Image (spheres, rainbow, N blue to C red):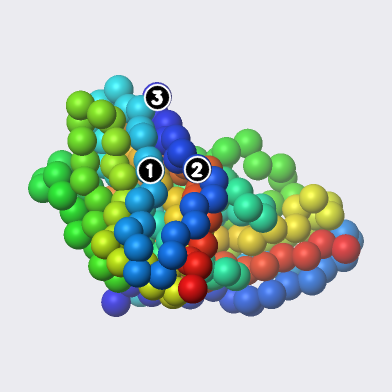
Amino acid sequence: AQSVTQLGSHVSVSEGALVLLRCNYSSSVPPYLFWYVQYPNQGLQLLLKYTSAATLVKGINGFEAEFKKSETSFHLTKPSAHMSDAAEYFCAVTNFGNEKLTFGTGTRLTIIP
Amino acid sequence: DTEVTQTPKHLVMGMTNKKSLKCEQHMGHRAMYWYKQKAKKPPELMFVYSYEKLSINESVPSRFSPECPNSSLLNLHLHALQPEDSALYLCASSRGLRETQYFGPGTRLLVL
């Protein structure tokens, strides 16, 4: 069984401030973890993925995430928020023995000018 | 190139209509997916095709009928839909099952 919990359905940060979006996972076997971003009225775009290589993963648009097995976490960060980062962010998990991608409930990121 | 295309972008249909959604990828991916996404919710898996064979059907009502005519193309045939079927329908593809999924822009469907 696998699941993802995203703490905070809404997060607001000021432009230029640190972005931190939280994701905790549950998986009975080593997970593959993903962050996707969805801009209004668009599909999902892959930001970054963890597939058991380096624990610190760098993605597009200045985002990165760190896989912490001891905390079962895969939080998404960006040092300095930009207005264009306003979107819905989904964390997702799968594993080698599972054909399905399980999504978290999403976090809406708002950037305050 | 990680592009998945979907047509149409928007679709309005009555409950007695028959319509089809189309999804295409030219990345050589062998797995393709249909998801349904309601507003402010994550995508929900509907169907998975692997090597043009239906691999997963998430107990979707028979008014939704998927078809995979070849490795690049995935269709979703719609018939006698209900207003609650109104949603964003997303297609995705991956190199194989359990690989990274790449999503299309979606078709926004309104059933009247």
Which of B59 and A17 lies nearest the eye of the viewer?
Answer: A17
Which chain does the numbered disc 1 sit on? A
Q: Are marks 3 and 2 on the same chain?
A: yes
* Residue B87 can be seen, yes or no: yes
The amino acid at mark 3 is: Ala
First in sequence: mark 2 vs mark 1: 2
In the figure, residue A60 lies in which quadrant?
Answer: bottom left
Q: Secondary structure at mark 3?
A: loop
Q: CA distance from mark 3 to mark 1?
A: 20 Å
Q: Residue at x 83, y 52 (%)?
A: B82
Q: Secondary structure at mark 1?
A: loop
Q: Position of residue A4 (x, y in %)?
A: 42, 35
Q: Is residue B34 left or right of residue A58?
A: right
Q: Position of residue B47 (x, y in %)?
A: 53, 47
Q: Secondary structure at mark 2?
A: loop
Res. A1 mark = 3
Query: Dot 3, how many residues are within 10 Å of its Cα: few (below 14), some (14-19), or many (20+)?
Result: few
Quarter of the image where the C terminus of chain B is located:
bottom right
Q: Position of residue B51 (x, y in %)?
A: 37, 53
The amino acid at mark 2 is: Gly
Q: CA distance from mark 3 to mark 2?
A: 23 Å
Residue at the spot of label 2: A8
Residue at the spot of label 1: A22
Label 1 near label 2: C-beta < 8 Å? yes
